[in-house]
Image (tube, helix red, strand yellow):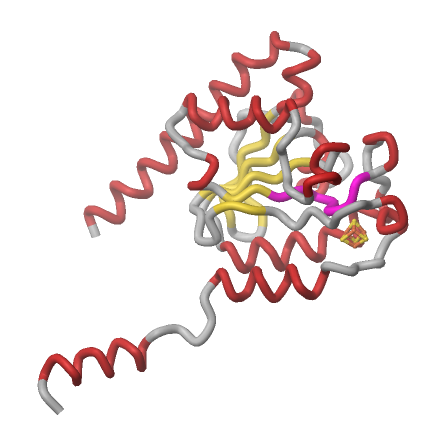
């Protein structure tokens, strides 16, 4: 075997047997027909999540709305378009991050998911997080924050302050839908996103130094 062929063989040998993409594809296939909570009854699509499967930044919202349920994709309505702009304002493209929700099926009339629904789906979100392995998690709104920080968490009080959950650095901020209702919250979200960007860039600098 010449040197080049030997190197190729070595690279093949060292290639991981399953990539993060494989893990997510398996989870999606497993949950496609999930009926673990009552939200299954009213859905058009189970909205799994999408984006860069090896993203350093993952965002978690509340649950699919009407348009998300119709298309089977997260954050594609008016709040999703605003989220794209928020991401771009600090230099992240939508393709660069991974986006999911606390519950993957639409609550009737876009109501807040009840504890039973949130808990049933949180186990799935945990597995999704373990597959993506983000360095930063952005929690969008009260439902996402409470899913990780507990029922006493308050988004108006806790947003903008770093937390740690499951060994991941976590930034809570307002949900884009809240900004559509109250544009006065935009400034706070921009400050939170700037903090995320600064921390993300500092990770790159550390890697560059090592
Ligand atoms: S919301 Fe989650 S737990 Fe409930 S049916 Fe959908 S995928 Fe299953």
Judged left or right of residue 54, residue 123 is right
The image position of residue 134, as x and y in percent, is 48, 49
x and y percentages locating residue 132 in the rendered image: 51, 55
The answer to which image quadrant residue 124 occupies is: bottom right
As displayed, is residue 206 above or below residue 187?
below
Tally the marks. 0
State the residue at coordinates (64%, 42%): 73
Residue at the extreme bottom of the image, as rendered: 1
Please state which of residues 5 and 209 is positioned toward the viewer in this rendering: 5
101 falls in the magenta region: yes
Residue 154 is covered by the magenta coloring: no
Q: Residue at x 86, y 40 (%)?
A: 114
Can residue 179 be seen here? Answer: yes
Secondary structure that dominates the magenta span: loop
Q: Residue lying furthest left in this view? A: 2
Q: Is residue 183 left or right of residue 142?
A: left
Q: Is residue 58 above or below residue 75?
A: below
Q: Quadrant of residue 81?
A: top right
Instruction: In this rendered view, identify the residue nearer to me: 54 or 75.
Output: 75
Which residue is rendered at x = 57% and y = 42% of the image?
Answer: 99
Looking at this rendering, what residue extends furthest in the front direction?
A: 71
Q: Which residues are magenta?
A: 100-106
Asked whether residue 146 appears in the rendered view, the answer is no
Q: Residue 156 at x, y = what percent?
A: 66, 20
Figure check: 188 above or below 42: above
Residue 137: x %, y % from top left: 53, 41
Compared to 3, does 151 lie above or below? above
């Amino acid at each position: 075997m010449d040197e080049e062929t030997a190197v190729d063989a070595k690279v093949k040998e060292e290639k991981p047997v399953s990539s993060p993409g494989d893990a997510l594809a398996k989870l999606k296939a497993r949950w496609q027909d999930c009926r673990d909570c009552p939200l299954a009854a009213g859905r058009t699509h189970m909205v799994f999540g999408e984006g860069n499967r090896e993203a350093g930044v993952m965002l978690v919202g509340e649950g699919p709305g009407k348009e998300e349920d119709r298309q089977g994709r997260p954050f594609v309505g008016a709040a999703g378009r605003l989220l794209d702009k928020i991401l771009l304002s600090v230099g992240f493209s939508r393709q660069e991050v991974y986006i999911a929700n606390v519950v993957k099926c639409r609550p009737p009339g876009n109501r807040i998911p009840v504890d039973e629904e949130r808990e049933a789906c949180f186990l799935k979100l945990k597995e999704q997080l373990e597959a993506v392995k983000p360095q930063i998690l952005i929690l969008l709104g009260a439902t996402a924050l409470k899913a990780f920080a507990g029922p006493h968490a308050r988004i108006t009080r806790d947003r903008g302050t770093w937390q740690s959950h499951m060994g991941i650095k976590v930034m809570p901020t307002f949900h884009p839908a809240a900004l559509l209702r109250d544009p006065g919250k935009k400034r706070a979200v921009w400050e939170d996103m700037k903090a995320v960007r600064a921390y993300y860039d500092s990770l790159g600098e550390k890697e560059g130094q090592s």
